[in-house]
């Protein structure tokens, strides 16, 4: 149960041994470690570790290249292992189902693509999931986010994918997650108050709850 819970944590979690070797890490930590050298993270852990065997949590901005966190927990019981958990920024507007419109995601993506083509000579490759249902979404915020990402890009690849075994909870109801993966040529800072945006070295991932009905309860 502990390991399964850690695997579904949206925050990176890593356990090192005393030599700086990784004894355990969850999925989010694997993404972090694919871009950041584990030695750099281990040095940060040792530098910020408590002097005595205990667990401490501190809220402050931490940045490893393009990865930014709002705090960390570091702790150990003995000199054999030490653990760290970084906190991602989850400061998003609460989702109010009444403010959402039922929309076809692929049509919204194509609208943003065609609009971008009118302004730039951007080359696009789109890999849509044809089985995506219409979902309730903040349409204006979504289109603005897409246009912000695509602005000034020379090339872009867009893929839609439903994540298996992961959910977003809204008003005590669970909804599957739709990932929109956008690979781009121009790297820039992108923020959204309405959607979770994961920044990659070569693009972005937008995570959206799949809300097919406003009174839907996908637990059933």
Image (spheres, helix red, strand yellow):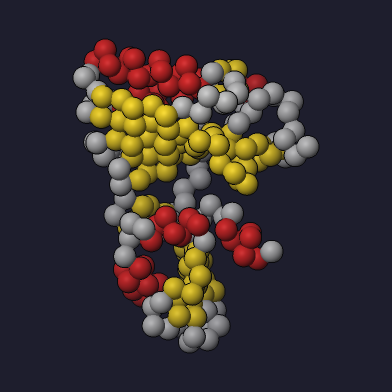
How many tags in the picture? Answer: 0
| 24 sits to left or right of 115 | right
Looking at the image, residue 188 lies above or below residue 136? below
Residue 53 located left or right of residue 152: right
State whether residue 59 is above or below residue 81.
above
Image quadrant assignment for residue 192: top left
Residue 163 drawn at (x, y percent): 56, 41
The residue lying furthest to the top in this view is 118
x then y, percent, for residue 198: 42, 43
**Does residue 96 appear left or right of residue 30 in this picture?**
right
Q: Position of residue 87 (x, y in %)?
A: 48, 56
Compared with 68, 36 (above or below) is below
What residue is at 52 percent from the left and 61 percent from the top?
A: 26
Image quadrant holding the N terminus, namely: bottom right
Residue at 30% from the left image edge and 18% from the top image edge: 116
In the image, what residue occupies the spot 78% across and 37% down? Answer: 220
In this rendering, does residue 24 appear at all?
yes
Q: State the residue in front, 57 or 22.
A: 22
Residue 19 position by quadrant: bottom left
Quick check: can you spot residue 61? no
Give the residue displayed 29% in from the left and 54% down from the top: 65
| Observer-nearest of 187 and 162 | 162
Closer to the camera in the image, 146 or 95: 146
Residue furthest to the right: 220
């Amino acid at each position: 149960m502990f390991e399964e819970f850690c695997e579904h944590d949206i925050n990176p979690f890593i356990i090192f041994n005393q030599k700086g070797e990784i004894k355990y890490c969850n999925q989010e930590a694997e993404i972090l470690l694919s871009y950041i050298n584990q030695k750099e993270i281990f040095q940060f852990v040792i530098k910020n570790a408590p002097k005595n065997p205990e667990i401490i949590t501190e809220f402050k901005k931490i940045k490893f290249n393009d990865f930014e966190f709002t705090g960390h927990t570091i702790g150990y019981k003995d000199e054999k292992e030490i653990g760290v958990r970084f906190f991602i920024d989850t400061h998003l507007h609460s989702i109010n189902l009444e403010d959402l419109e039922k929309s076809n995601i692929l049509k919204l993506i194509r609208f943003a693509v065609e609009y971008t083509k009118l302004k730039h000579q951007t080359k696009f490759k789109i890999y849509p999931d044809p089985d995506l249902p219409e979902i309730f979404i903040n349409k204006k915020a979504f289109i603005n986010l897409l246009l912000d990402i695509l602005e000034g890009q020379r090339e872009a690849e867009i893929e839609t994918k439903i994540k298996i075994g992961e959910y977003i909870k809204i008003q005590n109801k669970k909804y599957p997650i739709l990932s929109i993966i956008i690979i781009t040529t121009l790297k820039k800072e992108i923020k959204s108050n309405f959607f979770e945006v994961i920044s990659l070295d070569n693009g972005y991932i937008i995570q959206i709850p799949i809300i097919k009905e406003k009174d839907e309860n996908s637990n059933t």
